[in-house]
Amino acid sequence: MVCVCVCRSVMQSCSSALCILILLIITFTTVSVSADPPVKVNLHDSATLPCSERCSGLVRWTVFTKPTDTLAECDQTSCRSVKEGYQMIHDQYLKGNLSLTITEADFTKRGWYTSDCDDKDLCDVRLQIEPLSTAVQIKSGDSLVLKLDISDPVEVIYNSTGTVGPSSGQICTVDRHSTWCKDEYTQRASLTSVFELRNVTPSDSGVYTVMDKRNEEVIHIYTVTVGSAGGRGDHPDLDTDIGAAVPVSVTVLTLSVLGVTLIVFVAVIVMSVVANKRQRREKRPSQDEG
């Protein structure tokens, strides 16, 4: 009604093309305001896309971009899973619950889904996957490896956790087999099946976010801590745990020397005792004669 009134009020001073443009603007504004929030689930969990409508005919669910590719459908007699991993429940359908269940959600199943009743649109629902979160601890000089998880173009965004780190923001863009990076990362970054940042230093510590560039969805968050190469410090040869640094051969040699010394010491004592007894025996006859 609002659209009709607006058009009528401007008909006398505008063309039909302008009136159509006004209708389109009002329509898309109404859709964007009334859109339902997306369904968010963890990776590999099941997801239920809600739809509560009455339909006495055939209800179909499809991906929004593939309207002829049916995923699951129901009518008055039964429900059918046309594609594996998608299902509807007939008892719920009879009660007006036309929801679609995705048995295992992954990143390939993200996006908009739509349902229709006898080719009349009913519900549009968007599925999102909750971002993955990974903590990484590596040594200075090693490579930081980030899984991209999706084949769509992504951005790698860095946020420093220290005052000495490089400036935060987008550092690289990855589009299938090509990579574009800021100048300070160009020589260190490479792409195979994963994104690799070579020769990291403690200043590279921070939060790295892999974001779906097209849909502006966060895919994976890496919290990275880069330690010094020496483990306890920059100079591993100054390790205070001396016992752990002594070679086994040195320890065995030391024990051998101590053992030989002890044997010699005992032998000397025994020989001294034997000599004293011999001297006493030799003195006894002369003492008896006197």
Image (tube, rainbow, N blue to C red):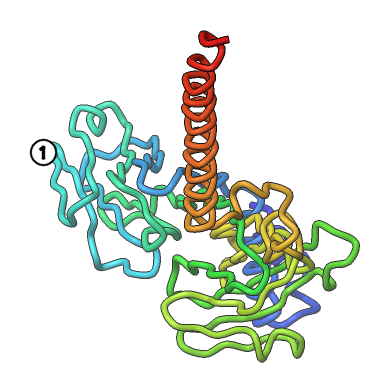
Q: Which residue is at a point 32% across and 32% down the rendered structure image?
A: 97
Q: Which residue is at a point 36% across and 50% down the rendered structure image?
A: 105
Residue at the front extreme of this rendering: 290
Q: Read off the residue under disc 1.
A: 78
Q: Secondary structure at mark 1?
A: loop
Is 14 in front, or is 153?
Answer: 153
Q: Which residue is at a point 37% across and 40% down the rendered structure image?
A: 48
Left or right of residue 70: residue 224: right
For residue 196, above or below residue 34: below
Q: Which residue is at a point 55% across and 85% down the rendered structure image?
A: 190
**Number of marks present in the image shown:** 1
For residue 246, above or below residue 178: above
Q: Residues within 10 Å of mark 1 (few under 14, many from 20)?
A: some
The amino acid at mark 1 is Ser
Residue 183, x across and y down, in percent = 75, 90
Indicate the quadrant containing the C terminus: top left, top right, bottom left or bottom right.
top right
Quadrant housing residue 224: bottom right
